[in-house]
Amino acid sequence: MTIQWFPGHMTRARRQIEAKLKLIDVVIELLDARIPLSSRNPMIDEILQNKPRLVLLNKNDLADPEVTAQWVTYFADKGLQALPVDAANGNQMKEIMSRCKQLMAAKFETQIRKGINPRAVRGLIVGIPNVGKSTLINRLAGRKIAATGDKPGVTKGQQWIKVGTEMELLDTPGILWPKFEDQEVGMRLAVTGAIKEELLYTADIALYAVRYLCTHYGSSLKERFGIEKLPEDPSDTDAVIEVMEAIGRKRGALLSGGRVDLDKASLTILRELRAGKMGRISLETPSEV
Ligand code: G4P
């Protein structure tokens, strides 16, 4: 889903989430494990206030496990539990339910002491577009929930979806905007496919990705594309473009006359990276950001 964000939309999106917060016990904040901070809403703490919150690092199947472990520690230091998940494959669904229950444990104990039988934990999934909210809702529900067309500004009746016997989810997730005014964040979002390619030049996005790969995942790049030598200095743009051209030649992305079609090569690089063909790769680490 592509949403054109402008201040009016942001205000409406925020109001919609704030209205939903009144109905729920726990917020499930969905982030992309490859770019946890870049896929985060810049105003999230202000919007969610003190609601109990579970952070999920989704698309963990594509992210570097070592870097993800660093992110889990990063969030723990901020007092937030972060759980790496893979909504597409549905692992960790029981753990999500159990963590949400844990977050409510103290409140439920008080209720039990007062003789009140606690009801199911009520949750809301929030996150930026394409982070996997619908996929996660379907997984937790154990069935496909009809596309709701939940857009900022479009209101509709809320439905509770049962997740096992002890949890309920609001069927429409909260859609948040990323921090796209930051260029670096925009690039990372584009590399992962969260921002549509048409909004930026594909070759610029691929250049950013290849530079990052040369710096952090050189051996994966070499292995995938059979490249022998990588630039000694990845800040040298011409040298990184040479790598992209070498990839283009390997993949047959050529124009008439034998020149490399850099746009086509760029698309190939991004497609293969997003599909995990170069292995599990993260695009930001806690120490970098
Ligand atoms: P949204 O509601 O937050 O906008 O996101 P949505 O669930 O539509 O997911 C966006 C894309 O991310 C989908 O791919 C979905 O399959 C993929 N996805 C969600 N969770 C995971 C995950 O844990 N791992 C991986 N690798 N991918 C995940 P798509 O290409 O847009 O659609 P499709 O290929 O599923 O048809």
Image (cartoon, rainbow, N blue to C red):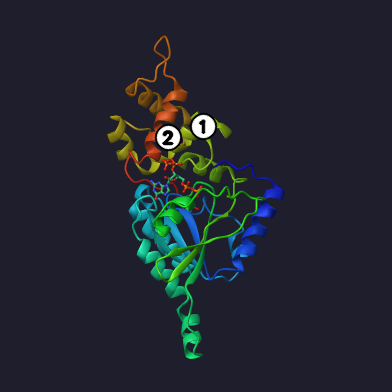
**Which mark is in front, 1 or 2?**
2
Q: Residue at x 40, y 24 (%)?
A: 245
Q: Residue at x 39, y 66 (%)?
A: 164
Question: Percent position (x, y) of residue 5?
Answer: 65, 45
**Marks 2 and 1: in contact by CB < 8 Å?**
no
Tag shown at residue 49: none
Farthest top residue in view: 257
Provide the residue designation for mark 2.
Answer: 270
Identify which residue, 229 or 250, lies in the foreground.
Answer: 250
Q: Is the CB of mark 1 within 8 Å of ligand 1?
A: no
Is residue 228 shown to the viewer in this render? no
Helix, strand or loop status at disc 2: helix
Q: Earlier in the sequence, mark 1 or mark 2?
A: 1
In the rendered image, which quarter is residue 210 located in? top left
Q: Is residue 1 left or right of residue 281?
A: right
Identify which residue, 188 or 169, lies in the foreground.
Answer: 169
Question: Percent position (x, y) of residue 158?
Answer: 58, 60
Q: Residue at x 54, y 51 (%)?
A: 128
Farthest right residue in view: 8
Q: Amino acid at mark 2?
A: Leu
Helix, strand or loop status at disc 1: helix
Provide the residue designation for mark 1.
Answer: 204
Q: Is residue 264 left or right of residue 276?
A: right
- Is residue 265 depicted above or below 182 in this figure? above
Q: How many marks?
A: 2
Q: Amino acid at mark 1?
A: Asp
Question: Percent position (x, y) of residue 25?
Answer: 53, 71
Is residue 78 shown to the viewer in this render? yes
Q: Is residue 181 left or right of residue 137?
A: right
